[in-house]
Structure formats: structure tokens, C-alpha cells
Amino acid sequence: MNLYLLRHAIAVEGGTPGLDDSQRELTSEGAAKMTRIARGMLALDLQFDLILSSPYIRTRQTADIVAEVFNIREQLRFTENLIPGVESEQAILEINTRYRKNENILLVGHEPTLSSLIAILVSGDPTLSIIMKKGGLCRLSIPDLVHGRCATLEWLLYPSQLAQLGR
């Protein structure tokens, strides 16, 4: 299995008065940059059997942009197991239970959840320091997905690298 992890694009600042964290939208700059990033992903000849996203507005919008650029809207699903604060074991359990047959899965989520998941899958240590920039993308190759050291980090790309490919 190839597991891709994508952090949502630039969103309205957290802590905005009267705005629940789950309702924060992408900024116009964030949406435009995410479109370039998705085009860069397409230029890399990536393919996804499934896009699994947090249901928060900013991740939903990020996943929608990728699904539109890749023309795979029917492969887009949302899960509470990718929202901030949910233990990584839950996402792994869901993938193994419902989506095990998919070869290329894109997870769209938040920090620090994504970097912690990468750390656990690559090293078994959730404290391994990994930085996921907004719009950054990671690829892990995983023979057998378990909660613990089971993956090889193939690459971790900055959003600027992806956006450059998508111009």
C-alpha cells in the first residue's frame, strides 16, 4: 500500500472570534495554492484509489480541490478519525477494516496528527520530529499497515515544490 498524507492548505487563522475550529475555511490564497499543489501532484503521475479526509471545512475544501483536479470525486470519503485529537490507531483501524484493498490512499488532515502518524508508522516513536507544512505531501510505502513501525518514508515534499510543478 502507498499511503499519502496531505496537510490542508492555508486557512483562516485559528482562534478567530465566533468561529469554531471545524468551520475554518481556506483563504483565497490557500485555495489557489492548493490548486497549483494538486496540479503538481498530477504532474508527478500520482494516482489515488481513495481520498479519505477529515470532515472539517478546511480539509474538506482541500480534498475537494484534489478530487476535482484528479477527476475522482466518487473516491472521496470523510471520516471523524482524521479530526484533531483522535488517536492514530482509529484511522489505521478504519483503513484496515474498510479500505484494505486500496493500493493508493490519500489522507487529508491536520497537524500535529499527520506528522505523529508518519512518525509512528516510520519509526514507532510518535515523538520523532517531522514537519508537515500546510499543503505538504508525504508518501509512505507500507507492506502491512499496523500501528507501529511498518512503513518506509519514500518522500516528503514542501508545498512550494509541488506548486512549482503545478504552474
Image (spheres, helix red, strand yellow):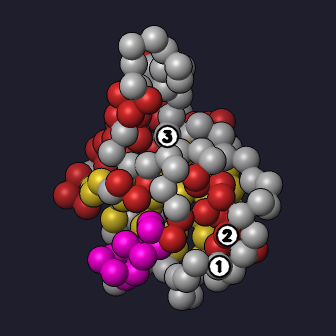
Question: Residue 159 got which mark?
Answer: none
* Residue indicated by mark 2: 120
What residue is rendered at 75% in x and 69% in y? 125
Whichever of labels 2 and 3 marks the residue nearer the N terminus, that label is: 3
Residue 58 visible to an observer of this rendering: yes
Residue 8 marker: 3
CA distance for labels 1 and 3: 24 Å
Badge 2 local density, few (<14 within 10 Å), some, or many (20+)?
A: many
Q: Of circles 1 and 3, which is in front?
A: 1
| Alpha-carbon span between mark 2 and mark 3 | 20 Å
Tell me the magenta residue range.
90-100
Q: Where is residue 102 in the image (x, y as percent from the top left)?
A: 36, 77
- Label 1 or label 2, whichever comes before in sequence order: 2
Does 146 appear above or below 14? below
Question: Looking at numbered disc 1 in the image, what kind of residue is underneath it?
Answer: Gly
Quick check: is 96 in the magenta stretch? yes
Q: Residues within 10 Å of mark 1 (few under 14, many from 20)?
A: some
Residue 159 versus residue 32 in the image, above or below: below
Compared to 44, does 66 lie above or below? Answer: above
Label 1–label 2 contact, CB within 8 A: yes
Q: Nearer the viewer, residue 57 or 66?
A: 57
23 sits left or right of 136 in the view:
left
Q: Mark 1 points at which residue?
A: 148
Secondary structure, magenta segment, majority class: helix
